[in-house]
Image: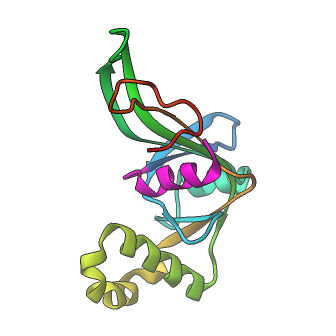
């Protein structure tokens, strides 16, 4: 599936697994709550110290993956055991945001995505915790890709590019 499909999956996923490389070269993947602000920029927040930031300092390249609408099913035509799903993968470069206006913009995007009904409390929360909150920006270095398995109403698998 195309980049627009993949971005939609990344936007709808309740969390996105971000995979980092530790300083010793071993992998480290963690599900995070990301918010996207444009076609290639994602943000997440975290503590100002910790393994994610250690990984970024050692190797800023990260991989993102997400799955939505994952439903075990029996193939309508052949009775096979399978899954219907939508998934996305992306590669990007992570960096710690040091500029306070960009941090606030990113935190606003995260809050708007996950707690839109609580935005009235946003400014007070920023006053209390901006200095003890780290924000990481992930800039995609190539277009994201997506995959899916989905059946139409007549039980036919919808192959690549077919949307309904």
Say left or right for 119 vs 88.
Answer: left
**What predominant SS class does the magenta segment belong to?**
helix
Q: Residue at x 48, y 31 (%)?
A: 158
Residue 72, percent from left and from top: 31, 24
Q: In this view, does 73 lie above or below 64?
A: above
Residue closer to the observer: 55 or 61: 61
Residue 55, percent from left and from top: 64, 50
Residue 135, percent from left and from top: 54, 70
**Segment tinted magenta in the rendering:** 1-15
Q: Residue at x 63, y 51 (%)?
A: 3
Residue closer to the observer: 154 or 6: 154
Residue 2 is covered by the magenta coloring: yes
Query: Can you tell which quarter of the image residue 85 is in?
Result: top left
Q: In this view, does 91 lie above or below 150?
A: below
Residue 73, percent from left and from top: 30, 22
Query: Can you tell which quarter of the image residue 98 is in?
Result: bottom right
Residue closer to the observer: 46 or 144: 144
Q: Which residue is drawn at 45% across and 25% down?
A: 157
In the rendered image, the quadrant that contains the C terminus is top left
């Amino acid at each position: 599936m195309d980049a627009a499909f993949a971005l939609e999956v990344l936007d709808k996923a309740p969390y996105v697994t971000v995979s980092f490389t530790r300083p010793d070269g071993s992998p480290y993947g963690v599900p995070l709550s990301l918010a996207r602000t444009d076609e290639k920029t994602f943000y997440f927040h975290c503590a100002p110290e910790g393994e994610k930031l250690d990984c970024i300092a050692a190797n800023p390249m990260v991989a993102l993956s997400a799955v939505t609408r994952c439903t075990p099913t029996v193939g309508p035509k052949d009775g096979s055991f399978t899954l219907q799903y939508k998934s996305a993968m992306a590669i990007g470069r992570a960096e710690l945001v040091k500029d306070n206006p960009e941090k606030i913009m990113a935190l606003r995007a995260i809050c708007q995505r996950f707690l839109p009904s609580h935005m009235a409390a946003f400014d007070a929360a920023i006053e209390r915790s901006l200095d003890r909150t780290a924000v990481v920006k992930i800039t995609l270095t190539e277009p994201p890709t997506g995959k899916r398995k989905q059946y139409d109403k007549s039980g036919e698998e919808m192959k690549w590019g077919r949307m309904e």
